[in-house]
Amino acid sequence: MDAFKLLLFIALASPTAAAKAGENTEPVGDGPALVNPYGIVITGADDTTYIIDRGTSSVFRVDLANGDRTIISGPNRGTGRVTTEMRGVGIEPGGASLLVVDSNLNAVLRVDVATGDRVVVSDATRGTGPQMGVPRGIAVSSNGEVFVTDFSLDAVLKIDPTTGNRRVLSGPTSSGSIGTGPQLKQPHGIHAAADGTLYVNDVGWPAVIGVNATTGNRRLVSGTGPVLDAGSGPDLSSLRGLTTRGPGTVIVVDFDENEVISIDTSNGDRVRISGPGVGSGVDLGLPVDAAIASSGQIIVCDFTPPSLISVDPVTGNRALITYVPKVGLQIPLYVTVLPSGFIVASDTGRKALWLIDPDSGDRAILSADDERGSGDAFVLPMQMVVLDGGDIVVADDGTDTIVRVDYSSGNRMTISGNGVGTGIEFVSPRALLQKSDGNFVVFDTGLAALLTINQKTGNRVLLSGSSRGSGPSMHNVNSIGVLANGAIIVGDSLSKMLTVSPSNGNRQTIQIDSNNVAITEPWGLAVGSSGLLYVTYYQGDEAAVASINPDDGEAQLLSGVSSTPAKRVGGGAGLRSPAGCSVDADGNVIVSDFYHGALLRVDVKTGNRIVITNSTVGKTVDFATLTSGSENMPQSVCMLFSMIVLLVGLF
């Protein structure tokens, strides 16, 4: 596509992109909808564009001129192993095939763009060398060399595209470390520049690091952390994808700050070229990757609202290229059940808290910027706790704060972080609980530590981490809970299930008696009234809810979907990416599934799953309508109350 056509499309698309793609009611482009796009590659003089979509386990081709979308590979297109969580994409020389990296399968797959067929290039059963731990990004050089970043190995791997053999190009090995320069710490996106340099977005520092593709030597290009600091300009926060725009310029997208940043590779200086306060048009939601069109426009892949957005590199103006509106919940990650029976869900796609009637599935925004309540807007609302008075406290991984939400008004007030409270500064607060003394505990993934937060002052002190407490290290924790004895339960995607002493911070692994339960990467965690732990997890093609007895580690598979017959438990609604969970008054487990944008009720006795709300179950109403006449009670509770009143009248 030539520059004139692209600019014409931008001009035509701009009026529809008034604010956020999530608020745009008109679709852009025809074809199947993107659900959770995560990577982009553009190739050829005609700007052939491919998108990997985690939500549909598919690879799309998108026409930049009109936004039309076509699935070229997926569950119903092509043969071979179906992907489950694609994280990166590259194109092989000649353009006939793509290489994708899947973090659940721990594999690199080749996708034929003509047939959609998928072939495993490298995984645990194909190729020799170190096993991939949590592969995140992939880059293919102009001569066909393949490089993968591994989030857990803190390394860049080089993979032979023919044999699948793997070796550490840069980073630690069992016998030492390969390459000199600053160590990698949670590397994510990677891009192979024309001069042979591999540019890596490192989330752990955060920083952009250049890696020599031959020696593995590393140099700091730009960084804003306390350890790696180089260049001036806006801070880096949560880096995902990156690309290059000519020699000497790296383009990065920042997931938390919703912005596109240009970096001068000679001095590390950073310039915000599009984002809050720079450029007009549709807002960036959660940008995850970027590529450069032949016109020079930056094409941004936005995780949510699921879309492609064109960014003018000079003005920063933004316009939708392709988009399909999503009804209802977008990316519900965490849930909690109120004493009334209503359910609250945090939605990182809508940047909101929802209130849901568990009987009808009807839903209303409880708190969100420009929709309900005042105060600073949510960016990435995560785990929540409900206070005795009914207000809700939520960890926001995007603003690095803990926020109290007034249930009656939706008003938001920061109670710790961003100038409120003293002590250790948040980097990435995600998991949250409230102790019996009223104080809060939060797990910060950036710090890899648990912090205690004073409920009155917001002051923060270290509870457990690298410098306090003994035992296994904590890494990537999504949910935490507290037992009746005060011990803190931690579900870690790398260290599995841990208990943490609130008095000394010591950490101890719960030895799980598997019982056909392989809790590889625990996600959601809830403590039932009986003291049992309920855990959600998904790995490969398995998605499940399990229970664990914290006293002896006995585990039981309660509900599951899998290609393995022994791991299929319960019927009803599908389960794909279970995240947060909570327990209702009847002992059922309420689960959020961010792949389906749904909440489900899981019967712990039968394993059966019922959809509570999704795009087709329940409708979106305003808060007053949802709660009117019920005194904030769902329909089932109201009916029970009415029956009691009737019986009292009869007698």
Image: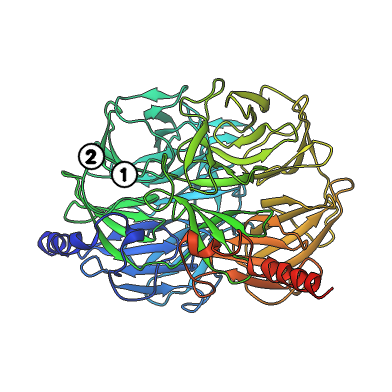
Q: Are marks 2 and 1 in contact (CB under 8 Å)?
A: yes
Disc number at residue 193?
1
Of 87 and 459, the residue lying toward us: 459
Which of the 4 image quadrants contains residue 88?
bottom left
* Identity, as a three-letter code, of the amino acid under mark 2: Pro
Q: Mark 1 or mark 2, which is nearer the start of the sequence?
A: 1
Q: Is residue 87 above or below residue 502?
A: below
- Answer with left or right where residue 154 lies relative to residue 192: right
Which quadrant holds the N terminus? bottom left
Of 536 and 644, the residue lying toward us: 644
Disc number at residue 485?
none
Secondary structure type for disc 1: loop
Is residue 467 at all visible to an observer of this figure?
A: yes
Q: Which colour scheme appears in the figure?
A: rainbow
- Answer with left or right where residue 207 lies relative to residue 130: left
* Identity, as a three-letter code, of the amino acid under mark 1: Ala
Of 6 and 479, the residue lying toward us: 479
Q: Residue at x 78, y 53 (%)?
A: 528
Q: Residue furthest right?
A: 552
**Crowding near the residue tagged with mark 1, few <14, some 14–19, many ≥20 C-alpha atoms within 10 Å:** many
**How many numbered dots are placed on residues in this image?**
2
Residue 409: percent from left, percent from top: 48, 48
Q: Is residue 388 above or below residue 371?
A: above
Q: Residue at x 56, y 55 (%)?
A: 345
Residue under label 2: 247
Residue 631: percent from left, percent from top: 61, 59
Which of the 4 image quadrants contains residue 387?
top right
Residue 156: percent from left, percent from top: 49, 42
Secondary structure type for disc 2: loop
Q: Is residue 533 above or below residue 651?
A: above
Mark 2 → mark 1, Cα distance in angstroms: 8 Å
**Crowding near the residue tagged with mark 2, few <14, some 14–19, many ≥20 C-alpha atoms within 10 Å:** few
